[in-house]
Image: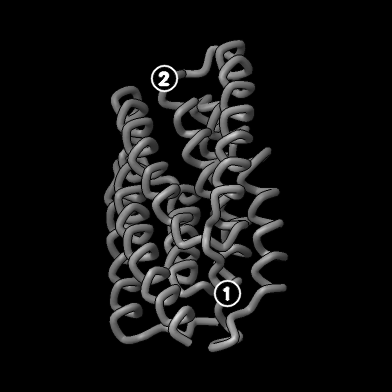
Amino acid sequence: MLSLSKKEWAIWIGSLLVVAASNVASADFDLLTLLAALIGVTSLILAAKGNVWAQVLMIVFSILYGIISWRFRYWGEMITYFGMTLPMAIWATITWMKNPSKENRNEVAIRKLNRKHAAVLFFFCLIVTSGFYFVLRGLNTPNLIFSTISIATSFLGAGLTMLRSSYYALGYATNDIVLIILWLLASKENPIYIPVVVNFFIFFFHDIYGFVNWKKRELAQSVG
């Protein structure tokens, strides 16, 4: 499962330590937030390798993060992860399992994004985001604009993951930035959510690393 290089072991363990320290040091330690973060970090380091177990862990993370969002009434995040990210992670798991790389059976084969894929993805992103906006507004969701933007970026990240595109990581990195803003706003009301902000800073780093790693793998696959 963990076919990591020495550098990746260092990144993974270092990230786990930072996440654990920020959560434990919090005045209002929350075990669920810590558990979700540890699973999320592990999922991202495996995703950078194109390992299908990344999507299995994303299924678990989606459930835990949905519960955390529900507790703060971030209905957009809760609905997004329960109703979109979770089923798309299940779909991505099946897709990745069916499309292993020829060079390494433990890694998913990368597919280049064409204009048709991009057009369909952005069309459905517009439809889904527009629909969710009115639902969230009706639920009096806190920080409505950022919650709506989070839906769009999360959909793009999940969609690109299913398409096995290296740009999935940029979609999620953009989503990380939005979530950092959302949870900073939440932290102003309740400091218990400060560790969540730290968690998404770590996630952002991993998504950028994932994009760089997938681009290297994509080049290797095209050459091979």
Mark 1: amino acid: Ala
Mark 1 or mark 2, which is nearer the start of the sequence? 1
Are circles 2 and 1 on residues that touch, CB within 8 Å? no
Label 2 element class = loop
Q: Residues within 10 Å of mark 2 (few under 14, many from 20)?
A: some
Q: Quadrant of residue 76?
A: top right
| Picture layout, residue 151 above or below residue 99 | above
Q: Percent position (x, y) of residue 194?
A: 31, 39
Q: Quadrant of residue 41?
A: bottom left
**Viewport quadrant of the N terminus:** bottom right
Label 1 element class = loop
Please name the residue shown 33% across and 45% down the image.
195
Mark 2: amino acid: Asn
The front one of 50 and 205 is 50
The front one of 172 and 13 is 172
Q: Percent position (x, y) of residue 110?
A: 54, 70
* Residue 109: mark: 1
Please name the residue shown 60% across and 58% down the image.
163
* Residue 216: mark: none
Please name the residue shown 65% across and 48% down the image.
86
Please name the residue shown 39% across and 52% down the image.
170
- Given this view, does label 2 or label 1 mark the residue nearer the observer? 1
Q: CA distance from mark 2 to mark 1?
A: 38 Å
Q: Percent position (x, y) of residue 178?
A: 37, 35
Give the farthest residue toward the front: 115
Q: Which residue, given by chain and number where applicable, does mark 2 sit on?
A: 143
